[in-house]
Amino acid sequence: MNKQSLLSIFAASVIIVSCGKKDDKAAQAAAAGQVKEYKTLVIQPESATLNTDYPASIQGQQNIEIRPRVEGYIDKIFVDEGAVVRAGQPLFKISAPEYEQEVRTATASIKSAQAAVSSAKLAVNKVKPLVEKEIISKYELETAQYNYDSALATLAQANASLVNARTNLGYTTVTSPVDGVVGSIPFRLGSLVSSNNTEPLTTVSSIGNVYAYFAMNEKVLLSFSEGSGTLAQKIKQLPQVSLLLSDGSIYGEKGKIETVNGLINTETGSVNIRARFPNPRGIIRSGSSATVRIPTQVKEGLIIPQSATFELQDKIFAVTVGKDGKTKNANITILENKAGNYYVVTSGLKAGDQIVLEGVASLKEGTQIKTQNQNAETVYADLK
């Protein structure tokens, strides 16, 4: 082999080696490009107030059906639907002339009975001295006395009839029994009404205080029963709750959980709870919808965003990152009363673990990732 051939072979070898190094670098670069960056957090114990929201329906403290006590035609309607009324304020006037006639008849009966009493008394006074002088027998005095007693009884009966007649006449003006708000009025002027009507004249809702009814999971309820003391005692110790109105604003008055229904709904596994809120200005109306917010104090607990977890076969997982940069799924348990956008972890994670904050549902276990560690104050900004 001549010198020129050797030089040609050497040059070709150099070219092949050079190309191989370039391919290796390209492969490494390609491999490096496949390592995706994820936001992560090194979890540490946190203290915070977590809020748990429950959809609620609002009812007035009293929803009183207003029904007529007498039969007649509606002559006047003094209020409109939705009006705020006071106790004793007239609502309806029922035209019933017969009750006015009964008052007149009872009044006349009283006058007649009073005259009969006066006459009978005169008879007693006239007979009494004659009996004392033995001019007439005692029988005459006893008869006069009996007539007097009978006249007094008739007068008492007439007075009772007048009271009854006036009471019935008073029923023709229907008044509100409580302070509250008037509901719908299905009847109009001229409608014939009586106590036998299936529909009430209207409903007055007493809203000085309002009740918010909501349902709580049985497991959450059981957590209230842990430790010493009865459930009723624990309910009294619960913190005040807030009310979120339908427009998202927070109602200015705080409420208190008062009662827990003794029966658990077998279909939903939940129990109904009632919270009372003062409503001095009548802002909240019966029948409206709202949200009850219950605060939970967490001291030195492991709190993670719900977005940093995923569910699989009724289990909840978080994704941790090892020192080698590879991911690992961690099966965690949490407090039942999920608070807002966060979970309070009771097992499966420990302080110092690094977790992935986003995209965990599509992240396979053992994946090599690049971490972008986040500041805890940024992650928990809405808890502070």
Image: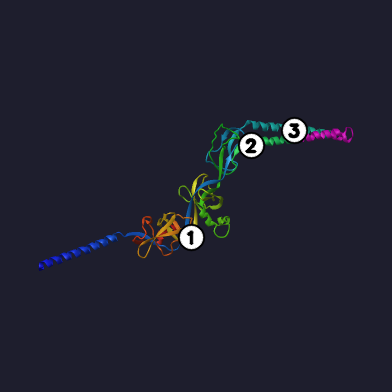
Q: Position of residue 179 (x, y in %)?
A: 57, 44
Q: Write down the region rendered in magenta.
A: 127-152
Q: Position of residue 178 (x, y in %)?
A: 59, 43
Residue under numbered circle 3: 113
Residue under numbered circle 1: 298
Residue at disc 1, secondary structure: strand
Q: Pick whichever of labels 3 and 2 is earlier in the sequence.
A: 3
Q: Main secondary structure of the magenta part?
A: helix
Left or right of residue 104: residue 234: left
Q: Residues within 10 Å of mark 2 (few under 14, many from 20)?
A: some
Left or right of residue 18: residue 376: right
Residue under numbered circle 2: 170
Closer to the eye: label 1 or 3: 1
Q: Position of residue 101 (x, y in %)?
A: 66, 31
Quarter of the image containing the N terminus?
bottom left
Placement of 370 over or under 87, stated as above or below: below
Q: Pick whichever of labels 1 and 2 is earlier in the sequence.
A: 2
Residue 15 highlighted magenta (yes or no) = no
Residue at disc 3, secondary structure: helix
Placement of 76 over or under 208, stated as above or below: above
Is residue 218 among what the camera can see? yes
| Residue at 48% over, 60% down | 298
